Image (spheres, rainbow, N blue to C red):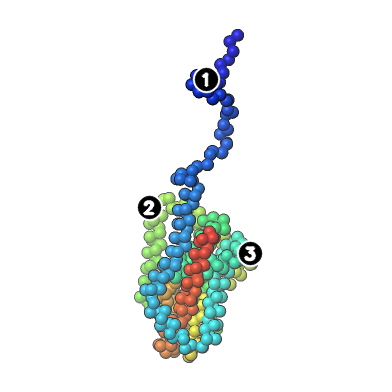
Amino acid sequence: MTPPPSPCPDLSLASPAPCVDLPPRSPLAPSSPSSPSSPSSPSSLASPTRHLRVALSLVPLLLIGGWAAVDWRAVHDGTARLASANPWWLLAGMVFTCLCWVGASVTRQGAIPERLPPGQLLASQFAAGAANHVLPAGIGAHAVTLRFLQGRGISLARATASLALYSLVKPIAKMALILAFLVAFPGTLRIGQLVPDQKTLLLAAAGILAGLAATAVVLSVVRRLRRPLLEFVRTALTDARILHTRPSRILALWGGATVFPLFQAGVLASVGASLGLPLPWPHVVFAYLAASAVAGAVPAPGGIGPVDAALVIALVVFGAPMALATASVIGYRVLTVWLPLLPGAFVLSALVRRKVL
């Protein structure tokens, strides 16, 4: 009987080294580590990612620095006027400014069924305030909040529905406050000159109709958007129903949306009191509510520009001198925008570096 051939060929004439039968290599066995110079090594891949993360964390600082350089005159004038103001009233205005972030955080929590970490939520809203003053129409704040919610494991549809509910509740709560002021102070609030004229109302109605028509055209042309839109609407309606069955969420959502504009109006009233503005607080608060409701729809970064002009006009209508009204609005912007701007940018960069956003 012929013996089976050996798996090792006879190479004695070619090499003196003995032939050893090696066991077959398992496909699950780890491969040899790649060299440091290999383009697919982890170190070579991590380096560009790390540089990209650092660059993204510096983008808010660069944007805010450029915006501050363009609007430097407003910063200088507001600081010069506040130098002679009552410091205790300015301190009260800073307290109201801090309460604005608390109110925004409470409203954000009320607009989502999941429980969010309070500390990170407050930090994200502080950072969102800085982003909101860079991009128009609240896009910056919504983008920061959307990244924060997705980082907590919340789906894109639910996070977007939360932003939509938050944006819907705020103007409704503000209009309810305006009606409450009109009922509480009948005959003392001068609203005749604050009501938009017929031309302004027609332009606003035309803008709303144009937006709805453009949305309908886009959905009819781009059919791929229909399914995400239907999913968003379904999620928004379901979450709104669930949230309004929980008393804690109802209180957080509507309570936070109600106190937020009151806190902002408190900042304006405190600055006015520090400068000797001859108006009672109810008039200043109502002037802020009316001006922000009328001019807040203009897509300006943080409402700066249209809202400022409307605030000055509203204060003058109620009897404030033009110089004091202008100084009060500038001081309001210094407390709510310029002082927290740089710290908010640093917090935003830190949250990006720590992958919270």
Whole-percent x and y of residue 332?
47, 80
Identified by mark 2, the residue type is Val
Q: Could you tell me which secondary element the residue under label 1 belongs to?
A: loop
Q: Could you tell me which secondary element the residue under label 3 belongs to?
A: loop
Confirm or deny contact between disc 2 and disc 3 (CB under 8 A): no
Q: What label does residue 12 carry, if any?
A: 1
Q: CA distance from mark 3 to mark 1?
A: 85 Å
Whole-percent x and y of residue 93?
53, 81
Residue found farthest to the top: 1
Binning the other alpha carbons within 10 Å of mark 3 as few (below 14), some (14 to 19) or many (20 upward) gives: few
- Please tell me which residue is depicted at 42% across the width and 76% down the height of the picture: 307
Q: Is residue 243 visible?
A: no
> Which is more toward the observer, 297 or 324?
324
Direction from residue 213 to residue 254 in the image, left or right:
right
- Please tell me which residue is depicted at 49% across the width and 64% down the height of the picture: 349
Q: Which residue is mark 3?
A: 246
Identified by mark 3, the residue type is Arg
- Please tell me which residue is depicted at 54% across the width and 72% down the height of the picture: 101
Whole-percent x and y of residue 310?
41, 79
Q: What label does residue 187 carry, if any?
A: none
- Which of the marked residues, 3 or 1, is nearer the chain's N terminus? 1
> Which is more toward the observer, 235 or 344?
344
Q: Which residue is mark 2?
A: 221
Disc nearest the viewer among 3 and 1: 1
- Which of the marked residues, 1 or 2, is nearer the chain's N terminus? 1
